[in-house]
Image (spheres, rainbow, N blue to C red):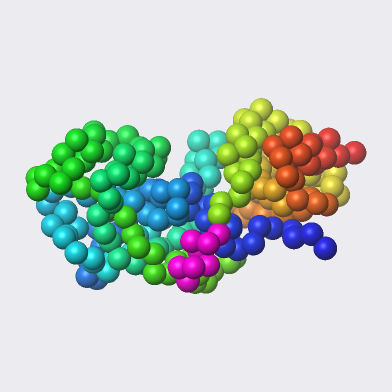
Amino acid sequence: MPLAAPPLPERIRTLAATSRAGQLVVDGARCPVTGAVDAAGRPVLLVRPGEPLHSLRGDAVVSVSLTSVRVLGGVEHPRGIIEVQGWAEAVPAGEVRSAAVAIAEHTADEALFEAIEGYGAPDAPRLLRLDVGQVVYLTGQDSGVLDADEYLDAAPDPLAEVAERVLAHVNGAHRAQLASGVGRLLGLPAESAWLWELDRYGATVRIGEDDPALVRFPWPAPAGTGPCLEESLRAILCSC
């Protein structure tokens, strides 16, 4: 029987890949932070002079909160919250540019250029990353803990980029068709329907405004390519 949803480690890695860092905890103290996640799934942080981690020269035990959101009709809705716990360390010189690019995809900041150009200078912004110890997650009705190997050995959904483009297109141009198709499949009205998640195993639709429900539609078989994913989704949009 095919899976109705991605394996949990893959789902968390996929969410992490689309997340931005929101809060850092160092020695029990909370502070805002600018950051994102690199290609390996590790949080990477931009740290300015005067911030708690700037003077770090060894490892420091920290946790970083990552938030993934879905924008529907101009309003942000949380998809999941992930807390990565581990040890902060300097990004190696050869990986500084890729770490800065990962952050810039979520937050444009002039300090990223200063961190690259002034790498190693005591008064320049620094780029740090986390050596992952464990990952605490809360997404939908799922919550729990992944150890470092479970998290780092997983990979994001290989169709994630295609899925996000298709999802944005459907929510921007085909919501009426989505509501009609979902309504026919469920046998009841599906007002205010939005495509909430789309992956190689299925689609999740958010229905309702005041008390929304998430309804999962698994594919008969996992989609292996972008065109297969679009064809699977078309079965919902064009259901009759």
Residue 211, located in which quarter of the rendered image? bottom right
Q: Is residue 107 visible?
A: no
User: x, y percentage for residue 36?
Assistant: 38, 48
Q: How many marks?
A: 0
Magenta-colored span = 147-154
Nearer the observer, 59 or 22 = 59
Specify the farthest residue to the right.
240
In terms of secondary structure, what is the magenta stretch mainly? Answer: helix
Specify the farthest residue to the front.
94
- Is 54 magenta? The answer is no
Query: Residue at coordinates 52% horizontally, 56% vertically from top-left?
Result: 13
User: x, y percentage for residue 186?
Assistant: 83, 50
Query: Residue at coordinates 39% horizontally, 69% vertically from top-left?
Result: 133
Q: Is residue 212 visible?
A: yes
- Is 151 magenta? The answer is yes
User: x, y percentage for residue 157?
Assistant: 61, 50
User: x, y percentage for residue 83?
Assistant: 41, 63
Specify the farthest residue to the top.
173
In the visual, does 133 lie left or right of 204? left
The quadrant the N terminus occupies is bottom right
Residue 164, located in which quarter of the rendered image? top right
Nearer the observer, 161 or 206 = 161
Query: Residue at coordinates 26% horizontally, 59% vertically from top-left?
Result: 89
In the visual, does 149 lie left or right of 66? right
Nearer the observer, 3 or 240 = 3
The quadrant the C terminus occupies is top right
Nearer the observer, 75 or 32 = 32
